[in-house]
Image: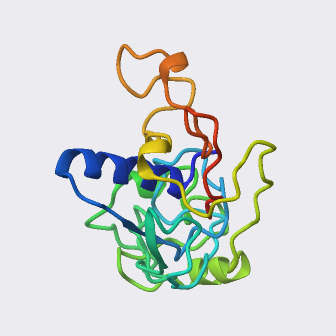
Amino acid sequence: GNNELNYAAGLVAAANDAFSMDAHVVIDTGRNGVADMRSTCANWCNPRGAGAGVPSTVKTANRSLVDAYFWLKTPGESDGCSETLPDGTKCPRFDAKCASVDSLGTKAGEPAAPEAGMWYDYQVKQLAENAHFKPEKLPASKNASHKSECPAGMVPQAPNPWVTPSQPSIPGQSSASMPPQGGQSTMGSSCAPAYQ
């Protein structure tokens, strides 16, 4: 499916093409230990059901694209505040994404989220409870080569998180002409498994 390695592959391919460089990325794994916990990727604020992911390391699934996994965002640090702060006052920097159906603090019984950058105790306990420190092993395709790297030019373009999967990412583009997802190149070879 769509994950950070797919996105990184598209980003690297675009940077290589636009700037004639050998681009690489670092993937933030501070809270990506649970795959598909949001109803849409656009719901980024204090996502419910998240877990801490692989601790910072240079041992990545695809070294031709990813230099490191790193906890860039401190687990437990709030992304943004609920409309009402924990002390009952109105949040001056409230963002509507922090009221999404996937955001902590929007369901009965969940404490309100503090302002961005502040410690969110409820969230850090969830991240610890749902932590997955090792990448899940994905089953190998029957036609997959067993290489640990796949060149940026042979991986799918990055998915657009603002468009539902049934819609084309580019206006006027049919879904039939969209690049395949899930680590498959148009040539049918399989890329290294990604950590969600």
Task: Estimate the x, y position of residue 87 in percent, counting from the top left.
Answer: 42, 80
Between 103 and 110, the one nearer to me in the picture: 103
Q: Viewed as shown, does residue 68 lie left or right of 106?
A: left
Task: Identify the residue at horizontal 42%, vertical 28% (top origin).
Answer: 169
Looking at the rendered structure, the number of numbered marks drawn on it comes to 0
Task: Identify the residue at horizontal 27%, vertical 51% (top origin).
Answer: 15
- In the image, residue 156 sits, relative to residue 29, either above or below, namely above
Task: Estimate the x, y position of residue 142 in percent, counting from the top left.
Answer: 81, 44
Task: Estimate the x, y position of residue 126 in percent, counting from the top left.
Answer: 66, 77
Q: How is the image coloured?
A: rainbow
- In the image, residue 28 sits, relative to residue 74, either above or below, namely above
Q: Viewed as shown, does residue 90 lie left or right of 151?
A: left
- In the image, residue 11 sits, relative to residue 53, either above or below, namely above
**Quarter of the image with the C terminus in it:** bottom right
Between 181 and 119, the one nearer to me in the picture: 181
Task: Identify the residue at horizontal 70%, vertical 77% (top origin).
Answer: 134
Between 130 and 53, the one nearer to me in the picture: 53
As drawn, the residue found furthest toward the left would be 19
Task: Estimate the x, y position of residue 158 in percent, counting from the top left.
Answer: 44, 44
Q: Viewed as shown, does residue 72 lie left or right of 35?
A: left
- Image quarter for residue 82? bottom left
- Image quarter for residue 185? top right
**Quarter of the image with the N terminus in it:** top right
Task: Identify the residue at horizontal 49%, vertical 69% (top origin).
Answer: 63
